[in-house]
Image (cartoon, coloured by chain):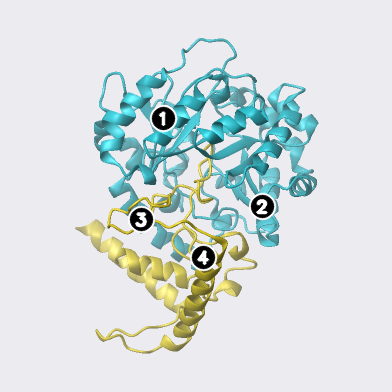
Chain colours: A yellow, B cyan
Amino acid sequence: MNYRWKIALLTLLGFSTAACCSTKKASKGDDKANNAIETEGIDNRVMLMYGVPMPDGSFPTPMPNEQPQIVRPGVPFPDGRRAIEMTEERAAEIMEMIKTEEAAKAEIVKEIDGVPFPDGRVAIVMTEERAAEIMEMIKAEEAAKEKK
Amino acid sequence: MKGKRLGLRKRLGLKLFKGLYDDAVERHELRTLFWECTLRCNLRCRHCGSDCRTDVQEQDMPLADFLRVLDEEVTPNVDPRRVLIIFSGGEVLVRSDIEEAGREVTRRGYAWGMVTNGMSLTRERLDGLVRAGLRTISVSFDGFPDEHNYIRQSPLSFERARQALGYIREVEGLVYDAITCVTPAMIERLEEWKEFLISEGITRWRIFSIFPAGRAKRDDSLHLNAEQFRTLMEFIRRTRQEGRISLNYACEGFLGGYEAEVRDHFYMCTAGVSVASIRVNGDISGCTSVRGNYTQGNIYRDHFWDVWQNRFTPFRNREWAHKGECADCKVWEFCRGGGMHLRDDEGELMYCHYNMLK
């Protein structure tokens, strides 16, 4: 299973990205009651016992991160793009964009159940049963690996 | 209460996360570099993991030695924007050249931060540090005056830490958090302490509990019993649900049913995976909490980057820890024997957080 699939499944399980829930997304009841799909912002953080928070307020993480952690105005990214200074207006615009995107994603998640991908696979919404199936698949995969 | 039980959803999440962690180990991308720049300290805390001293038994590492490693070994191999340098100690502010160190690190494109007890952090000193590029800071703040001063063994320490946090909050854009070492004396007062922190305007808070290393090993009054530990977990969980203050439990160990409930992330020990440290004597290791004999090299003998790339096996392959009480543990695959800081020189587990949740 590749990285993106793992992240997608973790998100579907309610652990938005591998680094999972932020404060307000922390589980508020037992596991069964928390099967709802959460599509809130990505929170990719790890905390060190005696460390300090990262300058962007997050914590260092070993997870892949497409964006540099520190963005300074005018500093070029390796791909040639340039960082721009964040203003209140720009931040508000981005927030709006994210909200719209997430709302659209939530709609898509509702609609994708049973819809085939172009390659013939079929999207499904995560349920307890499906989770159990995947668990079995992972176990079988690991057992096969161990045999090898 | 959650306890040790893992629900299916969480177990599946942990399975998936395990794969991601394995990928991270494979890549071992350096993201955090501690520089233990001194072991000198202006306090003598009861729980100190470093066994720091007020007298000079171990000389501070000269700044030039650290910068040489940065220039010759680290910078050519990383994108400085993706690596955070953390000055740690001892108490880093006992060094008079921290501002210079900060400027040099900033000039090379790294962000840097520091952990402090706040004793020497005046408004002027903070201004100087911010001018030197300080981006993030953590202050130890262990409870009300009686509890804090007891742990820190100084009647001034509570007020100084409070004052330091006050100055820090005024600096726009400076990321910070308050770190509380929870002792039995604070367990009953956690709600009160939370309200106090909120009333002080503190928005980020981190809690840890004592593990048996350094001076704490010899002081039973600092250790939580199983019931107190459960109470602490429930408190953190409840506080996170309220959402009034950002609270996390530190990366102490695997927490069974509390995974993802008391921290923003699933448990993992990133020491030696994405975190390295250069000790005051030049030793190269994982994070500075690791006090056991897991030194992988020394900057005065070895090439740091070579060590980072080719050694660190005990950190990246934990099979050696699959023994003793971990041998038959059901959650081994998720926990991998706990944090490296919980292992003694012989590799024995000193403390199991998961077993505290019985």
Q: Crowdedness of circle 1 by 10 Å Cα count: few (<14), some, many (20+)?
A: some
Q: Do labels 1 and 3 share a chain?
A: no
Q: Disc 3 residue type?
A: Pro
List the residue tagged with mark 4.
Answer: A90
B4, above or below B282, in the image: below
Query: Could you say whether the residue bearing mark 2 is in a helix, strand or loop?
Result: helix
Q: Do labels 4 and 3 share a chain?
A: yes
Q: Is residue A107 left or right of B177 when viewed as pictured?
A: left
Q: What's the CA distance linking mark 4 and mark 3? A: 26 Å
**Counting residues from the N terminus, which is met first, the one under dot 4 or under dot 3?**
3
Cβ atoms at labels 4 and 3 below 8 Å apart: no
Query: Could you say whether the residue bearing mark 1 is in a helix, strand or loop?
Result: helix
Which chain does tag 3 point to? Answer: A
Q: What's the CA distance linking mark 3 and mark 2? A: 28 Å
Q: Which residue is drawn at 39% across and 62% down?
A: B16
List the residue tagged with mark 2.
Answer: B236
List the residue tagged with mark 1.
Answer: B104
Residue nearest the viewer, comparing B78 with A23: B78
Q: Which residue is drawn at 32% across and 24% down?
A: B68
Which chain does tag 1 point to? Answer: B
Cβ atoms at labels 1 and 3 below 8 Å apart: no
List the residue tagged with mark 3.
Answer: A64
Report if residue B358 is visible in the image: no
Q: Residue furthest left?
A: A148
